[in-house]
Amino acid sequence: MSNPHSHSRALARTAVMGALCAVLTLVSVRAGNLRITFAFLPALITSVLFGPLQGAAVALIGEFLNQLLSYGLTATTLLWLLPPAVRAVCVGVAARRLRAKGHMLEAKPVLWYTVVIASTLLTTLCNTAVIWLDSVLYGYYSFAYVFGDTALRLFTGVITAAVVGTLALPLLRFLRKQPFLQREL
């Protein structure tokens, strides 16, 4: 039988990290059209430490709060939740597979950045698909609007992934050493 306290801790952790994602959406670094946001950091850390499902839950909660506060509840709100969850699942699956072989994803820098950047590129493509679907459903489709800045968004995604991935490394090392997490990892 599983420990009910463990489930309570997981639920509380997921809620707090999801809320942190929403708050970090407001924190960004801007340089011209380049915007680097730290919103994915809690979902990334959760995915690596606790697996793809908990990471996806954090991303879903964070993006739901972001959508609700930014745009309200719309017919396409649920679609906008999917891309961040895809990224969390990709990173979480890679971390879990490597952990099953006795290794930590963050201990292999080339693989770490490859997974974080590849998952971000996939997320950007998923976001583009959601922009397209949203534009078709709401009648504002234009090829230039939907696809015109895709290259810039991919480039920004790579830069953001590199920055957030770099910030996550010392945080993961620190968290893995914490006694309160040792029994859950």
Image (cartoon, rainbow, N blue to C red):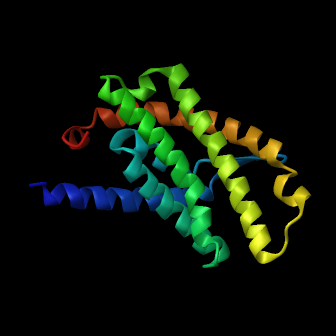
Query: In the image, what residue occupies the spot 67% across and 74% down?
Result: 71
Question: Where in the figure is residue 125, as x and y percent of width and height?
Answer: 69, 48
Quarter of image, res 57: bottom left
Which residue occupies the foreground of this view, 134 or 72?
Answer: 134
Which residue occupies the foreground of this view, 124 or 9?
Answer: 124
Q: Is residue 146 left or right of residue 159?
A: right
Q: Residue furthest left?
A: 1
Number of numbered callouts drawn:
0
| Quadrant position of the N terminus in the picture | bottom left
Query: In the image, what residue occupies the spot 27% across and 37% down?
Result: 178
Question: Where in the figure is residue 170, as x and y percent of width and height?
Answer: 45, 31
Does residue 34 sit above or below 173 in this rendering? Answer: below
| Quadrant position of the C terminus in the picture | top left
Question: Where in the figure is residue 84, as x and y percent of width and height?
Answer: 56, 53
Quarter of image, res 25: bottom right
Query: In the image, what residue occupies the spot 54% across and 32% down?
Result: 115
Quarter of image, res 137: bottom right
Question: Where in the figure is residue 96, as x and y percent of width and height?
Answer: 36, 35
Query: In the image, what residue occupies the spot 85% across and 72% down?
Result: 140
Which residue occupies the foreground of this view, 172 or 156?
Answer: 156
Q: Is residue 153 left or right of residue 88?
A: right
Does residue 110 sit above or below 132 in this rendering? Answer: above
Which residue occupies the foreground of this view, 24 or 85?
Answer: 85
Q: Is residue 165 left or right of residue 48?
A: right
